[in-house]
Structure formats: structure tokens, C-alpha cells
Amino acid sequence: MATLYPEVERLRVARDRLVRLRSKVEMSPPAPDDLPRSREWVARETLAHVDEMLPYWLGEIERILAATADPVPFGRNPSDLIRLLTVDRDRSLPVSELYFRLDFHLERLVRRLLELDDRQCARRGWDKTRGDMTIKQIVDVMVAGHIEEHCNQMAASLE
């Protein structure tokens, strides 16, 4: 079994939860005109964020793997301008495009994660809030845990 198989399964379950919410997302009102920086995100904004976070975290993992020494600084904070501007831009995309991106980015991430061995999963990055973290911990907390939180957030926003 691949080292990150349990985390990959969590990602797939989270994706399936998001897919089950699709009809509710499609029937939900469009994102408000005001920017989603100082209020709770609506479903389309959450989905736009999930779409941008998956390739972001894959890139951070690849930077750690490519580095010649551990730990490698990684991560960002919630006020990261690129993160916010991407959500601002993509929140008005058609729901079909948001779900296409979800599938595309998640499958790309999953394929890569399943290639990693124990040695690679033990490589370390350094986050200014959490400190040293292995790639396995990053995938557990920052990717799988994060998308699970957003599944809950999205489900709650659609009630």
C-alpha cells in the first residue's frame, strides 16, 4: 500500500461529498457582489478556494521534495493576496467549471501522492505557525484536513 493511501482516500471521500452537494450549489444564489474577505464564504467561493488550494499544496510539496536540505519554508496565511484574488476571480465561474477543476486538480494531486515513498513522505518543511512538518503531516493537516473542513463549511452554507 502506498504511504499516503489513507490520506488519498480521505481526499476522495471529501471530493465525493462535494459532488453530492453539486445540485444544491447549482441552485444556490450567485456569490454576492462584495468580496469574500470579511464575511463567511458562500458555497461557490468555498469551491473556488478548494480548486485553487489543491494545486497550491501540490506545488508546496514539490518544492520540499526538490530542495537539497530540510526543512524548507512552506505555506501561506489566510490573507495571502494570491489566494484571495483567485477566489475573487473564480467565484463567478459556472458551477460546471468549478467541478471540472475540482476533479482535474484532485486527480493530479492523488496521482502524485500515490507515487511518494516513505523517504519522500518524511521530508520536512517548516511553517511559521506550525513549525516542522513532514510531507505526510502536511498532506494530513493542510490538504486532507483542510478539504474536509471546507466540505463541512460548504454543507452548512447550503442548509
Image (spheres, rainbow, N blue to C red):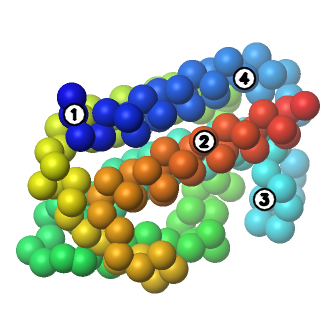
Image position of 138 with respect to 132: above or below: above
Residue 128 coordinates in the image, percent (x, y): 46, 82
Res 36 label: 3
Viewer-nearest of discs 1 and 4: 1
Kind of residue at disc 3: Pro
Q: CA distance from mark 4 to mark 3?
A: 21 Å
Callout 1 secondary element: loop
SS for callout 2: helix
Residue lying at the far left of the rendered structure: 68
Earlier in the chain: of badge 1 and badge 4, it is 1
Front position among marks 2 and 4: 2
Query: CA separation, marks 2 and 4?
Result: 14 Å
State the separation of the CA atoms marked 2 and 1: 21 Å
Quarter holding the N terminus? top left
Identify residue for label 4: 21
Q: Which residue is mark 2?
A: 148
